[in-house]
Image: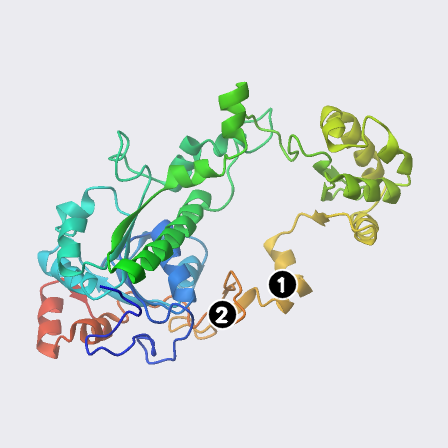
Amino acid sequence: MMLQHPLNMDGRPRGIRDIDGAARQGPLAPYKVLEIGSTIAGPFCGRLFADFGAEVVKVEALEGDPVRAMGSHEQDVSLYAASILRNKANAAIDLRTEAGREVVRALAARCDVMIENFRPGTLEKWGLGWERLREANPGLVLVRISGYGQTGPYSGRPGYGVISEAISGLRGVTGEPDRPPARLNTSLTDYLTGLYAAFGAMMALDHRHRTGEGQVVDAALYESGFSFMEPHVPAYAHRGVVAQRTGSALPGSVPNNLYQTCDGQSIHIAAMADAVFRRLCAAMGQPELASDSRYARAEARNRHARQIDAQVAAWVAGLSLDQAEAELRRAEVPAARIYSVADAFADPHYRARGMLVRAPSSALPGGVAMAGVVPRLTATPGEVRHAGRRLGEDTHEVLVRWLGLGEDEIAALAAAGAVRVPS
């Protein structure tokens, strides 16, 4: 069986209207995606599909996804949730009830991709395991996100982004060498895994187009983090080198560091390529450094990193941040101050590229500001259609449109506590 396009039950191509009737476009518009995960990795994976037009239904517990308690709030609305749940329909379904699980089984039978990020074994306990789901939907792509993967001795452990970051080795190489490992102020491994999971799902969909067969995408948080340890893996295997924290410097790439200006600000300069280093030396008024045998070639500079950093630091220390940026820009040396989110909002390039958008919101009349869609496609770009919906806002419409349930059936499910339908 060759599946060229996902179809509705009546054989027509899907994906013309959103659950609220708004036009839905994009390269993934033909696809239906069911997201039953929570917090970050699963919802981010689903958000990527939604940004590029897929009809994504977020199934949320009746008490709400924990992400609704995270981040800053406006009028009791989580701004984080409003962003990561954007472009999705929201159905409140209680998976702890058999009736709720039966609804999800029925939804899974009608979708192309199902995304979950529960602890391995949870779906099986609920009667939603792969073997059962594919009986009803052989072409289903089941995306399974977990801390340690679906197999292996750690698979049953509870997974959490920052814990997986520690296990992956990323945490160990982040921060200053004389201090404990630092963490990024964002859910790094959750986002990495969401990206890998979405990429895996697209490859699985491509396979389905050619064979008609669905499959499982097994994405582990620790493995996604470990894949970013790429330069350090062969270095240890072949040379016994254990990567350490190096602060703002990058070993083997000189100069590539953070330098302090005379007005107490910081600028990062990356001039590791020989041609760029020559331009930096000219900008510093020391072109002779580029012909010095200790510094002329990248390999030599790596052996004399401290001396080079001292030369660059002394030059930067005599300039203000604005002066340093201007000099380096004039010399075409890659460099930048360390932006805050406030700097991003003030930056004309961010505005010109549309990286800051305001999404309409059913919960906040003024809409919600959030980051734009990445990456950019020239022919079939993604878009932000609306912010995350209120809990259960679309339960009724999902049950009608996806399952064809009648009013009495929906009322019975609500009365049994299996679903929440806002009044």
Which amino acid is tagged 1? Tyr
Horizontal side of residue 363 vs 271, given as left or right: left
Task: Give the spatial CA distance, label 1 vs label 2.
Answer: 17 Å
Q: Which mark is residue 178?
A: none
Quadrant of residue 318 in the image?
Answer: top right
Query: Which residue is at a point 57% across and 64% down the rendered structure image?
Result: 355
Given residues 302 and 388, the one toward you in this image is 302
Query: What is the number of callouts on the image?
Result: 2
Query: Which residue is at a point 26% across and 65% down the rendered structure image?
Result: 2
Horizontal side of residue 135 vs 229, given as left or right: left
Say which element carries label 1. Answer: helix
Whole-percent x, y for residue 255 in the image: 73, 35
Seen as rendered, the residue at the extreme top is 240
| Residue 129 visible from this viewpoint | no
Say which element carries label 2. Answer: loop
Which of pointers 1 and 2 indicates the residue nearer the eye? Answer: 2
Horizontal side of residue 154 vs 299, given as left or right: left
> Taking 91 as reference, is 36 above or below it?
above
The quarter of the picture where the N terminus appears is bottom left
> Taking 116 as reference, is 59 above or below it?
below
Query: Counting residues from the N terminus, which is met first, the one under dot 1 or under dot 2?
Result: 1
Whole-percent x, y for residue 71 in the image: 44, 53
Query: Which residue is at a point 32% across and 54% down the rendered structure image?
Result: 204
Quadrant of residue 412 in the image?
Answer: bottom left
Q: Which residue is mark 2?
A: 381
Q: Which residue is mark 1?
A: 350
